[in-house]
Image (cartoon, grey):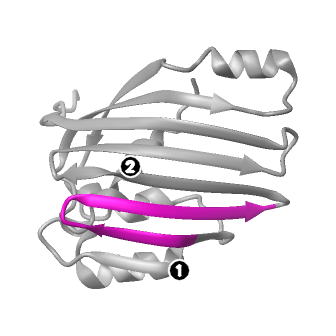
Amino acid sequence: MHVNKHLIWLVPLALAGCKKNAVEAQNASIEEVAEKMKESGVAQTSLHPGQWQATVKLDNISAPGAPPELEKNMRSSIGQARTMLECLTEENAKKPFERFVEGMNKDCKYDHISMGNGKIDSKLVCTTDGLTRTMTMQGAYSPESYKLQMTTEATGGPVKRVNMTMTLDAKRVGECPKKQG
């Protein structure tokens, strides 16, 4: 299962709001949400720096109308989990939202995003070259752990529609390893 390394930093969106005011937005660009997070200060206190372990599990995937061999290959990944370790530096912990949105295009817009009191609910829609991706995320968080349920629907590509549901479960497991040198 291919998982973008930055997926585990999707969390900063979820973790914003801890011990600060909540962030709420509708029909907002990534830049507008970033500005709201900056103004509220929530992103700067969302994650504790250190070694993080994140497990991503593909819960379901479907591609109605896809060639049978392709759908069979995709479905063989259901239930498989991938665990990653990554050091979150103090510097990156202060600006997790910026790290998450790096590489996202200007064609993305939040239908809604709500964060606060340890809960997140968001829907992001991106449209590029006739391909539309709709990504939703719901979950719970604290500065030391989070668990998110994410769904993605892609339409307009070579396979008319692909639906995917994943669970992301992460926790801080200690300090970052000392650099060898």
Q: Residue, x 52% and y 60% (percent of image)?
A: 102
Instruction: Give the class, few, some or many, for how many residues have Cα within 10 Å of label 1's Cα (few <14, many ≥20).
Output: some
Q: Which residues are magenta?
A: 110-128
Q: Residue, x 22% and y 27% (percent of image)?
A: 180
* 126 falls in the magenta region: yes
Residue 28: mark in rendering: 1
Q: Residue, x 39% and y 53% (percent of image)?
A: 138
Question: Taking 108 as reference, is 61 above or below it?
Answer: above
Name the residue type under label 2.
Answer: Trp
| Proximity of marks 2 and 1: CB atoms separated by less than 8 Å | no
Give whichever of discs 2 and 1 has the lower sequence position: 2
Indicate the position of residue 139 as horizontal and vertical percent values: 33, 50
Q: Residue furthest bottom?
A: 39
Question: Taking 96 as reference, is 168 above or below it?
Answer: above
Name the residue type under label 1.
Answer: Ala
Q: Is residue 68 left or right of residue 138?
A: right
Indicate the position of residue 178 as horizontal and vertical percent values: 16, 32
Disc 2 target residue = 9
Question: Taking 95 as reference, is 21 above or below it?
Answer: below
